[in-house]
């Protein structure tokens, strides 16, 4: 298969729309943590949030550190099972620190419920969640999203870091598969 065989998925959110919203989220986050003392720990969830996190932190004007955490959710095809595994963990303790999780999409919510429960055992001072996307139609575990980019319909989306079988992460826009 060459790149010529890959059909470009139709646009759901353009590069411009994504960039504009990411800048707004950066401003919301900056305002929220403005008067907190100490350094914010931004935890980017791998792999899907790597582009979003890279753009977002450049729009955040705060003292912050970046950490990565890999999550794998076992399931058939595109369906999450709720059995979640940490494939790459933080390299630093977060006890008594303000943590901001940066996720690509909250779909069933099962991955974020698992992560929030796991992080709580490490006793951070606070934990907030920033997600680029939310698919409320598929909720199985309701998790509070403190900073949200876009609410979307129940469609499988790719691009801007999100994949289907590891493909399409490099699309600069958010596209829809299977339409
Ligand atoms: P959960 O169902 O909320 O646990 O989501 C688990 C993970 O599935 C997300 O972090 C994404 O990496 C992935 N995912 C869910 N929906 C989509 C989608 O529409 N496109 C690409 N990845 C998705
Ligand atoms: Mg993910």
Image (cartoon, grey):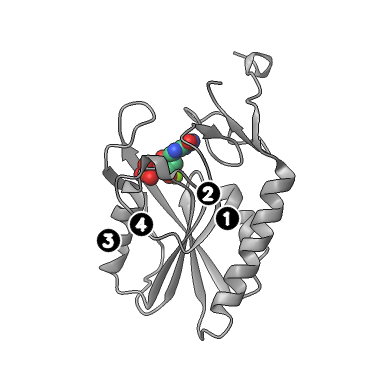
To which residue does mark 3 refer?
A: 117
Q: Are marks 1 and 2 in contact (CB under 8 Å)?
A: yes
Q: CA distance from mark 1 to mark 4?
A: 20 Å
* Mark 1 vs mark 4: in front: 4
Question: How far is the residue under mark 4 from the one under mark 3?
Answer: 11 Å
Residue 16 horizontal side relative to residue 157, left or right: right
Q: Say if residue 9 shows up in the picture.
A: yes
- Location of residue 126 (image quadrant): bottom left
Residue 75 pos. (x, y %): 30, 32
Q: Earlier in the sequence, mark 2 or mark 4?
A: 2
Q: Residue at x 61, y 41 (%)?
A: 160
Residue 76 to residue 104: above or below: above
| Disc 1 secondary structure class | helix
Image-quadrant location for residue 144:
bottom left
Residue 155 percent across, percent down from the top left: 49, 32
Of residue 150 and residue 76, the one placed in the foreground of this image is: 150
> What residue is shown with label 2?
49
Q: Earlier in the sequence, mark 4 or mark 3?
A: 3
Q: Is mark 2 within 8 Å of ligand 2?
A: yes
Give the CA distance from mark 2 to mark 4: 18 Å
Determine contact: label 4, label 3, CB under 8 Å: no
State ligand 1's quadrant: top left
Numbered circle sitting on residue 143: 4
Where residue 156 appears, as percent x and y from the top left, is 49, 31
Within-10-Å neighbours for mark 3: few <14, some 14–19, many 20+:
few
Query: Which residue lies under the disc numbered 1?
Result: 53
Q: Is residue 63 visible?
A: no
**Residue at 34% in and 76% down:** 95
Please tell me which residue is depicted at 30% across the width and 50% down the height of the picture: 141
């Amino acid at each position: 298969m060459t790149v010529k065989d890959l059909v470009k998925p139709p646009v759901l959110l353009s590069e411009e729309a994504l960039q504009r919203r990411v800048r707004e989220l950066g401003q919301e986050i900056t305002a929220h943590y403005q008067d907190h003392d100490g350094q914010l720990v931004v935890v980017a969830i791998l792999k899907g949030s790597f582009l979003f996190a890279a753009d977002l932190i450049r729009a955040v004007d705060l003292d912050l550190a970046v950490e990565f955490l890999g999550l794998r959710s076992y399931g058939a095809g595109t369906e999450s099972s709720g059995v979640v595994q940490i494939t790459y963990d933080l390299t630093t303790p977060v006890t008594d620190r303000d943590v901001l999780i940066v996720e690509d999409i909250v779909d069933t919510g099962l991955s974020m419920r698992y992560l929030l429960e796991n992080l709580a055992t490490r006793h951070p001072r606070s934990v907030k969640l920033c997600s680029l996307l939310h698919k409320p139609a598929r909720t199985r575990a309701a998790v509070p999203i403190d900073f949200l980019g876009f609410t979307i319909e129940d469609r499988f989306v790719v691009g801007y870091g999100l994949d289907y079988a590891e493909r399409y992460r490099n699309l600069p826009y958010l596209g829809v598969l299977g339409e």
